[in-house]
Amino acid sequence: MSRKEKVVVGMSGGVDSAVAAWLLKEQGYEVIGVTMQIWQDEEEEVLEENGGCCGLSAVEDARRTAQILEIPHYVMNFKADFKRAVMDYFVAEYLAGRTPNPCIACNRYVKWEALLKRSLEIGADYIATGHYARIKQLENGRFCLSRSVTAKKDQTYALYNLTQEQLSHTLMPVGDYSKEEIRSMAEKIGLSVADKPDSQEICFVPDQDYAGFIEGVTGKPSQEGSFVKADGTVLGRHKGIIHYTIGQRRGLGLSMGRRVAVTEIRPETNEVVIGEQEDVWTDMLLADRLNWMSVPDLTEDRKAAAKIRYNHAGTPCTIWKTGTDQIKVQFHEPVRAVTPGQAVVFYDGEDVLGGGTIL
């Protein structure tokens, strides 16, 4: 009898990864549960209180689930990988006046690069997660992500950066179901996490005070500077560039007599540019740090649908290369608040064409 294929399931303590493990066991795989220890030592008390996908309570929930499913469960230490690839990147991007997406960095460099490497070393054939996305192999031989069955929960945007090697060793069983179906399966098999709420916030900043977190890491208070018009006219004082993002309208503390918004952040002069509402709309962007998925590269102009943030429905556009690792995107209608540091992800129907980082 041929050996069972072995899969390591990244178990976050939530319902999605718990049901992913159960589905794969039902499909005949040898399943091993792994919870990734990514919290830093000094944060343990904070994480104990706040939970989230990497809190200490997550380990207990995952361990309980593994007992019910009768699969082995281990905790693997990825603290150093997480600090380097996610936390340090998060701080550096904000200090450079950009708005990072730490979940995308975590997916590519920690959940996949680090966990996959460790899993292959212990003899696994695949890793699996509870993400709402589907993986398929195209006629051209390439692996690509396809949107999950329910658009509402689709998580392909945050996974566009996965490589061919990573996708070829990944299973995503949850992408074929709706959240309601996943919860009802969890209930049916008696999992205590069936009704556990989804984690929403950035896991290492549970109180959502990004500026406070950055100040704590760097040991420096954020430097005040000027709010200016595009032409440099000073409008007032700001609390430090790490407090702001493109398109922001609230919390500016400016009495302009009308609603205004952040249109640009200038780290070199420590200025935050304020403009009218219409100034945050554009029909063009540039992006680099590209990762192509359904195609090996862009060889000619290409029409696609582009998402510029996680909850953006997507806008038709044309893409063309302007350099080895740079593209220009022309939207067929204007989009609001194109934000440097965020990802732009392209879709060809249901499939992920690729994506990059907005400049």
Image (cartoon, helix red, strand yellow):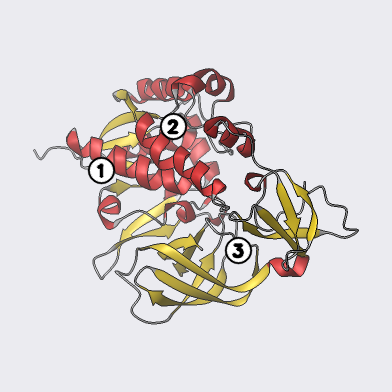
Q: Which residue is mark 3?
A: 338
Is the Cβ of the residue at disc 3 closer than 8 Å to that at disc 1? no
Query: Looking at the picture, how far across and down is residue 351, in whole percent?
Result: 41, 65
Secondary structure of the residue carrying tag 1 is strand
Q: Residue at x 32, y 71 (%)?
A: 297
Q: Amino acid at mark 3?
A: Val
Looking at the picture, how far across and down is residue 148, in whole percent?
46, 54
Name the residue nearer the viewer: 31 or 10: 10
Question: Quick one: 8 or 298, which is closer to the camera?
Answer: 298
* Residue 25 in sight from this viewpoint: no
Please tell me whether mark 2 or mark 3 is closer to you in this view: 3
Q: Residue furthest top?
A: 45
Disc 2 versus disc 3: distance between alpha carbons?
31 Å
As drawn, which residue projects farthest toward the right?
257
Task: In the rendered view, tell whether residue 316 sits above or below residue 37.
Answer: below
Please report contact status of discs 1 and 2: CB closer than 8 Å, yes or no: no
Q: Is 311 situated above or below 34?
A: below
In which quarter of the view is residue 295 placed?
bottom left
Image-quadrant location for residue 114? top left
Q: Give the left or right position of residue 308, taking residue 3 as reference.
A: right
* Residue type at numbered disc 2: Ser
Q: Which residue is mark 2?
A: 12
Expressed as whole percent of the image width and height from the top left, the position of residue 245 reads 65, 52
Q: CA distance from mark 1 to mark 2?
A: 17 Å
Answer yes or no: is residue 81 visible: yes
For label 1, the residue is 126
